[in-house]
Image (cartoon, grey):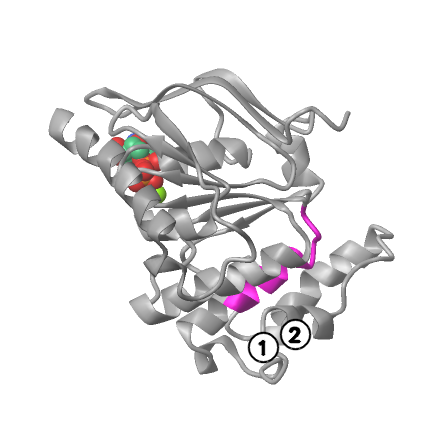
Amino acid sequence: MPDSPHVRISEVSKSFTTESETLLALDDVSLDIERGEFVCLLGPSGCGKSTLLRIIGGLLEPTTGDVSIGNRTPGDAQAEKSLGYIFQDPSLMPWRTAEDNIRLPLQVNRAKNRDSAPSVEGLLKLVGLERFGHYYPSQLSGGMQQRVALARVLAFEPSLLLMDEPFGALDEITRGAMRYELMRIWDADQKTVVFVTHSISEAVTLSDRVVVLSGQPGQVKGIVDIDLPRPRTDGLETDKLFLEYAATLRGLLSQEITNG
Ligand code: ADP
Ligand code: MG
């Protein structure tokens, strides 16, 4: 079924109940994501971005509505390792070197008889760390640790990558460089990516489409197609079209803040 979306989010709502109240975090969110598409979920802090990503990844059940990943449930996709998760915290095993952090999922992958499984060397090269395989996480910078985390997830060869503010803890300069690094890796084999951010420039740099979520409860406020040519490389931020997209997104977000 080449035409069915890779991810289908249908009328998803999520409420959280604590002792004192019930909070509606997501309200009736529907979205189709095509195979190979790079989609950013952009919205203010607390609007439900992580909650939506967790529901897509099968880490959380929606209260109503449902999600399918290539006609499977998120739980099945998760069990098959056909989706990979990257968080702000790279969560590497500190007692393993970079290459040993990557090797573990590779062994699991080989055991599943995926003979196309990439090599440790190939993955380190892909993320630009070929000289650092024998380093321990504590000997690597934040950006390098996040590259190892990315290589570790790519070892499973997931067709869907879910990224929750993966560069959020990095300094501005490293963060900017990591965007283009991610674009280079994504250009190499176009996986479907759902990327959560509250940074407008990050969303414009990376996305085919930006989904703007409103503040609590999270609803789809607008969807903006980003028709900037690829490959996207350093210097894009000064492009006239880039600035127009950024202004459009800022407009959608500021309405949100004024109304809220
Ligand atoms: P974002 O990632 O956009 O910053 P989140 O998805 O983390 O937002 O949270 C959305 C809302 O849901 C917030 O108000 C948050 O307090 C609430 N929330 C998230 N997880 C839980 C939980 N496990 N229990 C109660 N409330 C939660
Ligand atoms: Mg979040």
Q: Let me know if residue 84 is in the magenta part.
A: no
Q: Indicate which quadrant contains ligand 1.
A: top left
Q: Is residue 137 left or right of residue 47?
A: right
Q: Is residue 228 left or right of residue 258?
A: right
Q: Quarter of the image for the N terminus: give it.
A: top right
> Which residue in the protein does label 2 denote?
125
Residue at 73% x, 61% y: name it.
Answer: 106
Residue closest to the eye, 129 or 136: 129
**Mark 2 and 1 residues: CB-CB less than 8 Å, in contact?**
yes
Where in the figure is residue 98, as x and y percent of width and height?
A: 59, 75
Where in the figure is residue 179, as x and y percent of width and height?
A: 45, 60
Q: Secondary structure at mark 2?
A: helix
Type of amino acid at the residue the image marks with label 1: Leu
> Which residue in the protein does label 1 denote?
129
Query: CA separation, marks 2 and 1?
Result: 6 Å
Q: Which mark is on residue 222?
A: none
Q: Is residue 225 above or below residue 173?
A: above
Which residues fall within the magenta stretch?
A: 147-158
For disc 2, the neighbor class at 10 Å (few under 14, some 14 to 19, many from 20) is: some
Count of marks overlaid on the render:
2
